[in-house]
Image (cartoon, grey):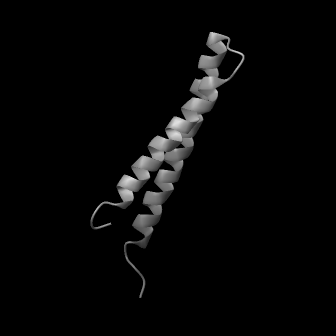
Amino acid sequence: MSDPKQPQNMMRYAGLATQWMVMLGLATYGGYKLDDALNWKFPLFLILFPLLALGFSLWQLIKELNKPGK
């Protein structure tokens, strides 16, 4: 009745969630620091870097979920 792979799948998705949070945090920090160094009034990189990180991580997630045998 119970799937023996369920704990393994749960750990895999927990790892993906942690990866997302770290990637978004680093992108936000990097964008903030770059905008601060350039002294721009509009926070372009603070907006752009997290959006690029989110797009990249969604692409990775879709690629991971489309693997055969998963």
Q: Position of residue 65 (x, y in %)?
A: 38, 60
Position of the N terminus, as image quadrant, is bottom left
> Does residue 68 appear to the left or right of 56 in the view shown?
left
Position of the C terminus, as image quadrant, is bottom left
Count how many numbered circles sit on residues in the image.
Answer: 0
Q: Residue at x 51, y 36 (%)?
A: 52
Q: Is residue 26 above or below residue 6?
A: above
Q: Quadrant of residue 11?
A: bottom left
Q: Residue at x 63, y 18 (%)?
A: 35
Q: Is residue 51 above or below residue 40?
A: below
Q: Position of residue 24 (x, y in %)?
A: 56, 39
Q: Quadrant of residue 45?
A: top right
Q: Quadrant of residue 64?
A: bottom left
Q: Position of residue 56 (x, y in %)?
A: 45, 41
Q: Is residue 69 above or below residue 34?
A: below
Furthest-left residue in this view: 68
> Does residue 7 appear to the left or right of 69 in the view shown?
right
Q: Residue at x 52, y 48 (%)?
A: 18
Of the pair 39 and 11, the residue shown nearer to us: 39
Q: Is residue 18 above or below residue 41?
A: below
> Does residue 23 appear to the left or right of 41 in the view shown?
left
